[in-house]
Amino acid sequence: MEYQVEASASVNYILMHYSDLCYDDNGPDCALRLLDAFDEAIDALTNNPVRGCRLADIPSKYRAAPFWEHLWLVYLVDGHTVYADLIIDDRQNYGKIFMR
């Protein structure tokens, strides 16, 4: 069974931010490798959305899957749709994002 994956505007914005950093720091090949890694993670979620894990400080409805050094795709599964809601950097205090 294949799942549909929908990426939020936040995911796209954060991905572009990190690809710009890769480009500035290491050149266009690095930025392209980051985007390819993200595409591979999305493709993997279409077939196996439970492959991710739970992370501390993130509500239990979410799962996370690493796709680049220090970067995790945070998503939830609802029926046959995977909602990619956020990209987090594990070097930062990501728990405060979910506190309200």
Image: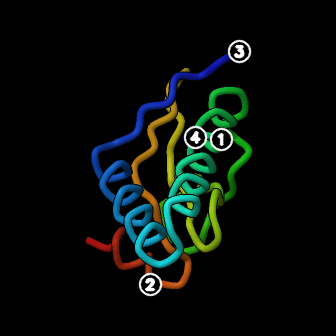
Residue ID for mark 3: 1
| Residue at image point 53% right, 74% down | 26
Q: Foreground residue, 75 or 38?
A: 38
Q: Earlier in the sequence, mark 2 or mark 3?
A: 3
Residue ID for mark 4: 39
- Residue 88, x across and y down, in percent: 47, 67
- Residue 45 falls left or right of residue 59: right
| Residue 99 vertical position relative to residue 32 in the rendered view, above or below | below
Q: Earlier in the sequence, mark 2 or mark 1?
A: 1
- Residue 11, x across and y down, in percent: 38, 51
- Quadrant containing the C terminus is bottom left
Q: Which is in the foreground here, disc 2 or disc 4?
A: 4
Q: Earlier in the sequence, mark 3 or mark 4?
A: 3
Which amino acid type is shown beneath numbered disc 4? Asp
Q: Which is in the foreground here, disc 1 or disc 3?
A: 1
Which amino acid type is shown beneath numbered disc 1? Glu
Q: Earlier in the sequence, mark 2 or mark 4?
A: 4
Disc 2 crowd rating (10 Å Cα; few below 14, some 14-19, many 20+) is few
Residue ID for mark 2: 93
Which amino acid type is shown beneath numbered disc 2? Asn
- Residue 31, x across and y down, in percent: 51, 59
Disc 4 crowd rating (10 Å Cα; few below 14, some 14-19, many 20+) is few
Name the mark on residue 9. Answer: none
